[in-house]
Image (cartoon, rainbow, N blue to C red):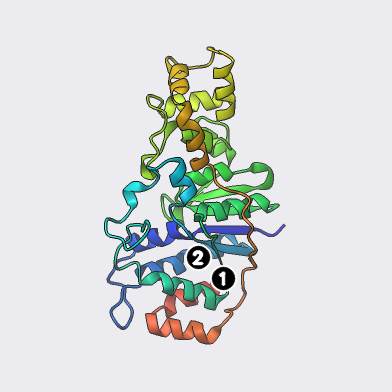
Amino acid sequence: MSRLMLLDTPSLYFRAFYGVPESVKGPDGTPVNAVRGLIDMIARLVADRRPERLVCCFDADWRPAFRVAAIPSYKAHRVAEERPAGDVEETPDTLLPQLPVIDAVLDALGIARSSAAGYEADDVIGTLAHRDPGPVDIVTGDRDLFQLIDDAREVKVLYTARGIRNLQVFGEAEVSEKYGIPGRAYADFATLRGDPSDGLPGVPGVGEKSAAALVSRFGSLAGILEAVDAGTTEGFPAGARKKIEAARAYLGPAELVCRVVTDLPLDVADALPKAPKDPEALLALSDRWNLASPVNRLLAAL
Protein backbone atom coordinates (compact mmCIF):
# COMPACT_ATOMS: atom_id res chain seq x y z
CA MET A 1 0.00 0.00 0.00
CA SER A 2 1.20 3.53 -0.73
CA ARG A 3 2.02 5.68 2.28
CA LEU A 4 -0.07 8.82 2.86
CA MET A 5 1.38 11.74 4.79
CA LEU A 6 -1.00 14.34 6.25
CA LEU A 7 0.49 17.62 7.42
CA ASP A 8 -1.09 19.79 10.10
CA THR A 9 0.15 22.76 8.12
CA PRO A 10 -0.77 25.57 10.56
CA SER A 11 1.07 23.71 13.32
CA LEU A 12 4.12 23.45 11.07
CA TYR A 13 4.21 27.00 9.75
CA PHE A 14 3.81 28.42 13.27
CA ARG A 15 6.71 26.20 14.36
CA ALA A 16 8.73 27.40 11.38
CA PHE A 17 7.90 31.03 12.09
CA TYR A 18 9.16 30.82 15.66
CA GLY A 19 12.06 28.51 14.82
CA VAL A 20 13.61 30.40 11.90
CA PRO A 21 14.86 33.97 12.52
CA GLU A 22 12.81 36.84 11.08
CA SER A 23 16.08 38.12 9.62
CA VAL A 24 15.46 35.58 6.84
CA LYS A 25 13.85 37.89 4.27
CA GLY A 26 13.01 38.27 0.63
CA PRO A 27 14.81 40.81 -1.60
CA ASP A 28 12.24 43.48 -0.65
CA GLY A 29 12.83 42.99 3.07
CA THR A 30 9.66 40.97 3.74
CA PRO A 31 10.25 38.16 6.25
CA VAL A 32 9.96 34.69 4.68
CA ASN A 33 11.12 32.65 7.67
CA ALA A 34 7.86 30.67 7.93
CA VAL A 35 7.85 29.94 4.19
CA ARG A 36 11.46 28.76 4.13
CA GLY A 37 11.06 26.79 7.32
CA LEU A 38 7.93 25.00 6.11
CA ILE A 39 9.50 24.09 2.76
CA ASP A 40 12.54 22.68 4.52
CA MET A 41 10.29 20.71 6.90
CA ILE A 42 8.43 19.14 3.98
CA ALA A 43 11.74 18.34 2.24
CA ARG A 44 13.02 16.60 5.39
CA LEU A 45 9.78 14.66 5.88
CA VAL A 46 9.69 13.50 2.25
CA ALA A 47 13.36 12.51 2.27
CA ASP A 48 13.13 10.62 5.57
CA ARG A 49 9.67 8.99 5.35
CA ARG A 50 9.28 8.57 1.56
CA PRO A 51 5.48 9.01 1.28
CA GLU A 52 3.93 8.37 -2.12
CA ARG A 53 1.05 10.70 -1.26
CA LEU A 54 0.96 13.92 0.74
CA VAL A 55 -1.69 16.50 1.66
CA CYS A 56 -1.11 19.84 3.36
CA CYS A 57 -4.20 20.31 5.53
CA PHE A 58 -5.36 23.80 6.51
CA ASP A 59 -7.92 25.50 8.74
CA ALA A 60 -10.84 26.99 6.83
CA ASP A 61 -12.15 28.00 10.25
CA TRP A 62 -9.73 27.82 13.18
CA ARG A 63 -12.61 28.19 15.69
CA PRO A 64 -15.65 26.45 14.14
CA ALA A 65 -19.11 27.69 15.13
CA PHE A 66 -20.32 24.22 16.13
CA ARG A 67 -17.49 23.86 18.66
CA VAL A 68 -17.98 27.37 20.05
CA ALA A 69 -21.73 26.71 20.39
CA ALA A 70 -20.92 23.60 22.41
CA ILE A 71 -18.21 25.19 24.60
CA PRO A 72 -18.09 29.02 24.31
CA SER A 73 -14.63 29.16 25.90
CA TYR A 74 -13.16 27.07 23.05
CA LYS A 75 -10.00 28.93 21.94
CA ALA A 76 -11.55 32.18 23.19
CA HIS A 77 -8.23 33.31 24.67
CA ARG A 78 -6.66 33.22 21.19
CA VAL A 79 -9.12 35.63 19.58
CA ALA A 80 -7.50 38.88 18.47
CA GLU A 81 -8.81 41.85 20.45
CA GLU A 82 -9.23 44.03 17.39
CA ARG A 83 -11.09 42.33 14.56
CA PRO A 84 -13.28 43.71 11.74
CA ALA A 85 -15.80 40.87 11.84
CA GLY A 86 -16.00 37.42 13.32
CA ASP A 87 -13.27 35.72 15.31
CA VAL A 88 -9.77 36.27 14.00
CA GLU A 89 -6.92 34.31 15.51
CA GLU A 90 -4.03 36.23 16.96
CA THR A 91 -1.32 35.88 14.33
CA PRO A 92 1.97 37.80 14.27
CA ASP A 93 1.92 40.66 11.77
CA THR A 94 5.03 39.34 10.05
CA LEU A 95 3.49 35.88 9.59
CA LEU A 96 0.25 36.94 7.91
CA PRO A 97 1.84 38.12 4.61
CA GLN A 98 3.68 34.81 4.33
CA LEU A 99 0.55 32.65 4.25
CA PRO A 100 -0.42 33.47 0.62
CA VAL A 101 3.19 32.80 -0.39
CA ILE A 102 2.98 29.35 1.21
CA ASP A 103 -0.20 28.62 -0.75
CA ALA A 104 1.36 29.81 -4.02
CA VAL A 105 4.54 27.77 -3.57
CA LEU A 106 2.62 24.58 -2.75
CA ASP A 107 0.38 25.11 -5.78
CA ALA A 108 3.33 25.68 -8.11
CA LEU A 109 4.97 22.53 -6.77
CA GLY A 110 1.74 20.58 -7.25
CA ILE A 111 1.51 19.53 -3.58
CA ALA A 112 -2.10 19.01 -2.53
CA ARG A 113 -3.78 21.52 -0.21
CA SER A 114 -7.06 20.72 1.50
CA SER A 115 -9.51 22.50 3.80
CA ALA A 116 -13.25 22.40 4.46
CA ALA A 117 -15.54 25.36 5.11
CA GLY A 118 -16.45 25.58 8.78
CA TYR A 119 -13.83 23.09 9.93
CA GLU A 120 -10.28 22.92 11.24
CA ALA A 121 -7.25 21.22 9.75
CA ASP A 122 -7.72 18.53 12.43
CA ASP A 123 -11.05 17.57 10.86
CA VAL A 124 -9.56 17.41 7.37
CA ILE A 125 -6.80 15.18 8.72
CA GLY A 126 -9.35 13.08 10.61
CA THR A 127 -11.41 12.51 7.48
CA LEU A 128 -8.50 11.68 5.19
CA ALA A 129 -6.89 9.38 7.77
CA HIS A 130 -10.16 7.63 8.65
CA ARG A 131 -11.01 6.66 5.08
CA ASP A 132 -7.52 5.60 4.00
CA PRO A 133 -6.49 1.93 4.18
CA GLY A 134 -3.06 3.00 5.44
CA PRO A 135 -0.27 3.36 6.17
CA VAL A 136 -0.79 7.00 7.21
CA ASP A 137 1.67 9.38 8.85
CA ILE A 138 0.10 12.41 10.56
CA VAL A 139 2.62 15.18 11.18
CA THR A 140 1.53 17.53 13.97
CA GLY A 141 2.40 19.20 17.23
CA ASP A 142 -1.21 18.78 18.41
CA ARG A 143 -1.83 15.92 20.85
CA ASP A 144 -5.55 15.92 19.98
CA LEU A 145 -4.70 13.97 16.84
CA PHE A 146 -3.48 11.03 18.93
CA GLN A 147 -7.13 9.92 18.85
CA LEU A 148 -6.67 8.98 15.17
CA ILE A 149 -3.89 6.47 15.82
CA ASP A 150 -4.80 2.97 14.66
CA ASP A 151 -2.21 0.19 14.64
CA ALA A 152 -4.41 -2.08 12.51
CA ARG A 153 -4.16 0.35 9.58
CA GLU A 154 -0.71 1.72 10.51
CA VAL A 155 -2.03 5.20 11.27
CA LYS A 156 0.65 6.92 13.33
CA VAL A 157 1.35 10.41 14.58
CA LEU A 158 4.76 11.93 13.93
CA TYR A 159 4.82 14.34 16.85
CA THR A 160 6.90 17.48 16.31
CA ALA A 161 7.38 18.70 19.90
CA ARG A 162 11.14 18.03 19.65
CA GLY A 163 11.44 19.26 16.07
CA ILE A 164 11.30 17.69 12.62
CA ARG A 165 14.75 16.13 13.03
CA ASN A 166 13.67 14.46 16.28
CA LEU A 167 10.15 13.29 15.53
CA GLN A 168 8.45 11.13 18.13
CA VAL A 169 6.52 8.34 16.42
CA PHE A 170 3.32 7.56 18.32
CA GLY A 171 1.36 4.37 17.83
CA GLU A 172 -1.10 2.87 20.28
CA ALA A 173 1.67 1.49 22.51
CA GLU A 174 3.35 4.87 22.83
CA VAL A 175 0.07 6.58 23.76
CA SER A 176 -0.61 3.89 26.35
CA GLU A 177 2.88 4.19 27.78
CA LYS A 178 2.78 7.99 28.04
CA TYR A 179 -0.76 8.46 29.34
CA GLY A 180 -1.77 5.10 30.80
CA ILE A 181 -4.85 4.82 28.59
CA PRO A 182 -5.98 2.56 25.74
CA GLY A 183 -4.13 3.57 22.59
CA ARG A 184 -7.05 5.20 20.78
CA ALA A 185 -8.83 6.71 23.79
CA TYR A 186 -7.12 10.09 23.77
CA ALA A 187 -10.30 12.07 22.98
CA ASP A 188 -12.10 10.53 25.98
CA PHE A 189 -9.09 11.25 28.18
CA ALA A 190 -8.82 14.87 26.96
CA THR A 191 -12.55 15.46 27.47
CA LEU A 192 -12.23 14.53 31.14
CA ARG A 193 -8.88 16.20 31.82
CA GLY A 194 -9.52 19.34 29.78
CA ASP A 195 -6.99 21.36 27.80
CA PRO A 196 -6.20 24.94 28.87
CA SER A 197 -4.47 25.60 25.53
CA ASP A 198 -7.84 25.15 23.82
CA GLY A 199 -9.95 26.75 26.53
CA LEU A 200 -11.45 23.44 27.69
CA PRO A 201 -11.82 23.36 31.49
CA GLY A 202 -12.32 19.61 31.90
CA VAL A 203 -14.21 18.01 34.79
CA PRO A 204 -13.49 19.98 37.98
CA GLY A 205 -11.35 17.91 40.32
CA VAL A 206 -10.47 15.28 37.71
CA GLY A 207 -6.84 15.66 36.73
CA GLU A 208 -4.64 13.69 34.37
CA LYS A 209 -4.12 10.70 36.68
CA SER A 210 -7.81 10.34 37.57
CA ALA A 211 -8.83 10.76 33.92
CA ALA A 212 -6.34 8.08 32.86
CA ALA A 213 -7.51 5.71 35.59
CA LEU A 214 -11.16 6.13 34.58
CA VAL A 215 -10.56 5.69 30.85
CA SER A 216 -8.28 2.72 31.46
CA ARG A 217 -10.84 1.06 33.75
CA PHE A 218 -13.97 1.68 31.67
CA GLY A 219 -12.49 1.97 28.18
CA SER A 220 -14.23 5.16 27.06
CA LEU A 221 -16.27 8.13 28.20
CA ALA A 222 -19.42 6.24 27.23
CA GLY A 223 -18.30 3.33 29.42
CA ILE A 224 -17.67 5.68 32.34
CA LEU A 225 -21.12 7.25 32.04
CA GLU A 226 -22.76 3.83 31.77
CA ALA A 227 -21.05 2.83 35.02
CA VAL A 228 -22.25 6.02 36.69
CA ASP A 229 -25.82 5.39 35.51
CA ALA A 230 -25.63 1.82 36.75
CA GLY A 231 -24.60 2.96 40.20
CA THR A 232 -21.19 1.30 39.95
CA THR A 233 -18.69 2.44 42.55
CA GLU A 234 -15.85 0.01 41.91
CA GLY A 235 -13.09 1.42 39.71
CA PHE A 236 -13.73 5.08 40.49
CA PRO A 237 -10.94 7.01 42.25
CA ALA A 238 -12.04 8.66 45.50
CA GLY A 239 -14.71 11.24 44.81
CA ALA A 240 -14.48 10.86 41.04
CA ARG A 241 -17.94 9.35 40.59
CA LYS A 242 -19.67 12.37 42.13
CA LYS A 243 -17.50 14.71 40.09
CA ILE A 244 -18.50 12.94 36.88
CA GLU A 245 -22.17 13.06 37.86
CA ALA A 246 -21.92 16.80 38.56
CA ALA A 247 -20.28 17.40 35.17
CA ARG A 248 -22.82 15.56 32.99
CA ALA A 249 -24.01 18.78 31.36
CA TYR A 250 -20.42 19.59 30.38
CA LEU A 251 -19.30 16.19 29.14
CA GLY A 252 -21.60 15.88 26.12
CA PRO A 253 -20.65 19.22 24.56
CA ALA A 254 -17.00 18.76 25.55
CA GLU A 255 -16.80 15.41 23.78
CA LEU A 256 -18.20 17.03 20.63
CA VAL A 257 -15.45 19.64 20.79
CA CYS A 258 -12.66 17.14 21.47
CA ARG A 259 -13.71 14.55 18.92
CA VAL A 260 -12.19 15.09 15.47
CA VAL A 261 -14.65 14.97 12.56
CA THR A 262 -13.99 12.02 10.24
CA ASP A 263 -16.70 12.21 7.58
CA LEU A 264 -16.22 15.44 5.61
CA PRO A 265 -17.00 15.28 1.85
CA LEU A 266 -13.44 15.82 0.62
CA ASP A 267 -12.05 15.15 -2.83
CA VAL A 268 -8.27 15.42 -2.86
CA ALA A 269 -5.74 14.40 -5.51
CA ASP A 270 -3.01 13.42 -3.08
CA ALA A 271 -0.24 11.97 -5.29
CA LEU A 272 3.11 13.51 -4.43
CA PRO A 273 4.59 15.08 -7.60
CA LYS A 274 7.95 14.00 -8.96
CA ALA A 275 8.43 17.41 -10.61
CA PRO A 276 6.83 20.85 -10.14
CA LYS A 277 3.37 21.37 -11.59
CA ASP A 278 4.21 24.91 -12.77
CA PRO A 279 7.98 25.31 -13.11
CA GLU A 280 7.77 28.90 -14.36
CA ALA A 281 5.60 30.02 -11.46
CA LEU A 282 7.87 28.19 -9.02
CA LEU A 283 10.95 29.89 -10.46
CA ALA A 284 9.28 33.29 -10.24
CA LEU A 285 8.29 32.69 -6.62
CA SER A 286 11.78 31.47 -5.77
CA ASP A 287 13.35 34.61 -7.26
CA ARG A 288 10.83 37.01 -5.75
CA TRP A 289 11.05 35.62 -2.23
CA ASN A 290 14.64 34.31 -2.14
CA LEU A 291 13.51 30.69 -1.82
CA ALA A 292 15.85 28.96 -4.28
CA SER A 293 17.76 26.95 -1.66
CA PRO A 294 14.79 25.42 0.21
CA VAL A 295 12.85 24.86 -3.01
CA ASN A 296 15.80 23.04 -4.55
CA ARG A 297 16.11 20.88 -1.42
CA LEU A 298 12.46 19.93 -1.70
CA LEU A 299 12.74 19.22 -5.42
CA ALA A 300 15.72 16.97 -4.70
CA ALA A 301 13.67 15.10 -2.08
CA LEU A 302 10.78 14.68 -4.51
Secondary structure beneath disc 1?
loop
Residue 116 sits in quarter: bottom right
Residue 32 sits in quarter: bottom left
The x, y position of residue 13, in whole percent, is 41, 62
- Residue holding disc 1: 111
- Amino acid type indicated by mark 2: Ile
Foreground mark, 1 or 2, reads 1
Quadrant position of the N terminus in the picture? bottom right
- Residue holding disc 2: 42
- Amino acid type indicated by mark 1: Ile
Relative depth, front residue between 295 and 241: 241
Q: Are circles 1 and 2 on residues that touch, CB within 8 Å?
A: yes
Q: Is residue 162 above or below residue 286?
A: above
Q: Residue at x 61, y 49 (%)?
A: 262
The x, y position of residue 166, in whole percent, is 45, 53
Choose the circle earlier in sequence order: 1 or 2: 2
The x, y position of residue 151, in whole percent, is 64, 42
Q: Residues within 10 Å of mark 1 (few under 14, many from 20)?
A: many
For the residues labelled 1 and 2, the Cα–Cα distance comes to: 10 Å
